[in-house]
Image: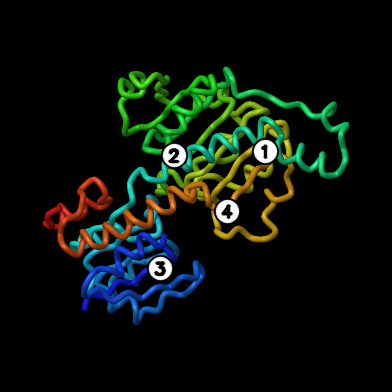
Amino acid sequence: MTKLVIAGRIHPDGMALLEAEPGLEIELFQDPGAHLPMESLSAADALLIRYGVITPAMAEKMPKLRIVSRHGVGVDNLPTTALGARGVPVTIVGPVNAVSVAEHVLAMMMALTKKVIASDTAVRENNWSYRSEVALSELYQKTLLILGFGRIGREVAVRAAAFGMKVEVYDPFVDAATINAAGYAAVVDWKTALPNVDVLSLHLPMTLETEGMIGAQELDAMKPTALLINAARGGLVDEDALFDALSGRMRQGGAGFDCFASEPPPKDLALFDLPNTVLSPHCAALSAESTRAMGVVAAQNILAGLKGELDPALIVNTASLKEAGHGV
């Protein structure tokens, strides 16, 4: 029997694919906060991970492992390089959640500019005079700077342009000609662009280079009315510096966050006390359509990995696999 460990519940259609596979023994841990016992992991030939973290030390104790399938696109919870050196491919689900996240980003922009939460509260509290007090704003003709022009960043750009926003893009791995050809303005130095930006939207992975990239200095460079949207990784932003900015110089601005430095965030997180924030529990990618697609693709990657038939475009540790002499 081939053993598969699943960390986190996946869509029934994805489970059906796995359960129909002959000779596959499945051990499912449904609770997002559940401890993954080492005795189960050490016996696993395959790992499908939606929640939790696998450290390098844990991976070393998984000698049978042949494939790791990430239910999503972020892999900062996995030792991808170390796994690649052992010949273990790590896969993601590709662009299936890009539309869901992009729509969530635009929803946060709209909620902040149109004061949706405060307006809803005012009506429920019979405060009709709020309409004479509130100052709403428009996205039209505002400048949006997108950091990261990957699958999600591109979908955000399309939707922002449809709202009539002026879209600027920074991505060191995409040449300026490609960005300009798509109809957007390529930015060479994103920090020097900050003073003219109305909305800054983050779409970068969490790495040593990007951790804490938005701090006090960057926030001080932005307009007092600027918005910061983060539907990527929580560690990209210094949350203490953000609180100081939004409660002080940028109190006319705001922030929309779908992810936090610690998840779930502490109950006393200072950002909770600010009226100019819109927050969600890292659910931007979890539309019904996206959740099904992620479950199915994650399951397909497990089956393909066990058969040696993976789609190379979905393997994230190709470089380390090749460096160690393993074919892809």
Label count reads 4
Which quadrant holds residue 307?
bottom left
Q: Label 3 vs label 2: CA separation? A: 25 Å
Looking at the rendered structure, the kind of residue marked 4 is: Pro
Q: Are marks 1 and 4 in contact (CB under 8 Å)?
A: no
Query: Is residue 25 depicted above or below 245 in this figure?
Result: below
> In the image shown, does 175 or 294 lie closer to the viewer?
294
Which quadrant holds residue 110?
top right
**Which tag, 1 or 4, sits closer to the chain's start?**
1
Q: Label 1 vs label 4: CA separation? A: 22 Å
Secondary-structure class at tag 4: loop
Secondary-structure class at tag 1: helix
Give the residue displayed 21% in from the left and 79% down from the top. 1
Give the residue displayed 85% in from the left and 26% down from the top. 132
Q: Label 3 vs label 1: CA separation? A: 38 Å
Between disc 1 and disc 4, the foreground one is 4
**Which tag, 3 or 1, sits closer to the chain's start?**
3
What residue is shown with label 3? 7
What residue is shown with label 2? 99
Q: Judge the density around disc 2: few (<14), some (14-19), many (≥20) Cα neighbours within 10 Å.
A: many
Is residue 261 visible from the viewing direction of this image?
yes
Q: Judge the density around disc 3: few (<14), some (14-19), many (≥20) Cα neighbours within 10 Å.
A: many
What residue is shown with label 4? 281
Q: Label 2 vs label 4: CA separation? A: 18 Å
Q: In the image, residue 95 lies at what x, y percent?
A: 35, 43
Task: Describe residue 324's horizontal placement relative to residue 124 as left or right.
Answer: left
